């Protein structure tokens, strides 16, 4: 059965440097509310972690956000708690459930997921989708999609 993802609002924006990507993340973080999910997609080196660093800075996280080699989820303290998930090494959605990668504590903070598509069917319906195209030193194209009206405030934050 084909799955069609509702997209209530979409915005495309380009960044010409890692700094610009971090600034975009920080700007979007100003719209963050407890319980939000930010789902990042894009190939290795697209800039998902750069975006996460900026998003965290925008939330007031002072710790260094990176992509640890063997950890799937890291929690950071900010204006809201930030749950940074990286599913690159996840084999399938069943493992995500088994590993407790989605849990009720995330309702109190913002969950930002790299390789979010690897959640498969357990990816929650209400999200800001962030799809990144581009690699190397090229300009990145960010396609931001609110999947529910409640997430349109992120798109308004960059107007
Ligand atoms: N416009 C840009 N936005 C983000 N990263 C960029 C950009 N231009 C070059 N880069 C580089 O691309 C790499 C992105 O790495 P990273 O954020 O870890 O990617 P990912 O988490 O998607 O695998 C970094 O080395 C960064 O310096
Ligand atoms: Mg990464």
Image: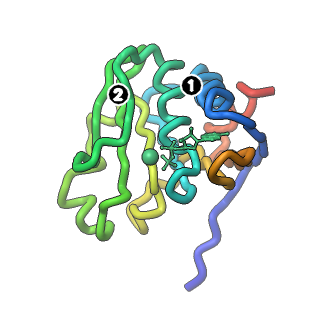
Q: Name the residue under label 1.
A: 29
Residue at (56% x, 25% y) in the render? 29
The C terminus lies in quadrant: top right
SS under mark 1: helix
Residue at (32% x, 66% y) in the render? 93
Q: Position of residue 147 (x, y in %)?
A: 63, 51
The N terminus lies in quadrant: bottom right
Q: Residue furthest bottom?
A: 1
| Image-based side of 36 in relation to 67, left or right | right
Inter-mark Cα distance, 2 to 1: 15 Å
Q: Which residue lies furthest to the front in this view?
A: 137
SS under mark 2: helix
Residue at (35% x, 35% y) in the render? 83
Specify which label sits upstream in the sequence, 2 or 1.
1
Q: Where is residue 125 in the image (x, y as percent from the top left)?
A: 51, 55
Residue at (63% x, 50% y) in the render? 136
Q: Residues within 10 Å of mark 2 (few under 14, many from 20)?
A: some
Q: How many labels does the image show?
A: 2
Q: Which residue lies furthest to the left in this view?
A: 98
What number is the disc on residue 108?
2
Q: Nearer the viewer, mark 2 or mark 1?
A: 1
Tell which of 81 and 142 is nearer to you. Answer: 142
Q: How crowded is mark 1: few (under 14 residues within 10 Å), some or many (20 or more)?
A: many
Q: Position of residue 26 (x, y in %)?
A: 59, 23
Tell which of 26 and 147 is nearer to you. Answer: 26
| Image-based side of 106 in relation to 115, left or right | left
Q: Do the residues labelled 2 and 1 touch (CB within 8 Å)?
A: no
Q: Which corner quadrant of the image does residue 3 belong to?
A: bottom right
């Amino acid at each position: 059965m084909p799955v069609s993802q509702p997209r209530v609002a979409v915005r495309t924006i380009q960044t010409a440097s890692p700094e610009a990507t971090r600034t975009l993340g920080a700007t979007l973080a100003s719209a963050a509310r407890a319980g939000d999910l930010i789902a990042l997609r894009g190939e290795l080196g697209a800039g998902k972690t750069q975006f996460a660093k900026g998003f965290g800075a925008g939330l007031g996280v002072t710790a260094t956000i990176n992509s640890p080699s063997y950890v799937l989820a890291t929690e950071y303290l900010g204006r809201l708690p930030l749950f940074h998930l990286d599913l690159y090494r996840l084999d399938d959605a069943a493992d995500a459930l088994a590993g407790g990668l989605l849990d009720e504590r995330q309702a109190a903070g913002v969950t930002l997921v790299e390789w979010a598509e690897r959640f498969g069917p357990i990816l929650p319906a209400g999200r800001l989708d962030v799809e990144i195209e581009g690699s190397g030193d090229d300009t990145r194209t960010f396609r931001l999609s609110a999947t529910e009206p409640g997430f349109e405030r992120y798109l308004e934050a960059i107007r």
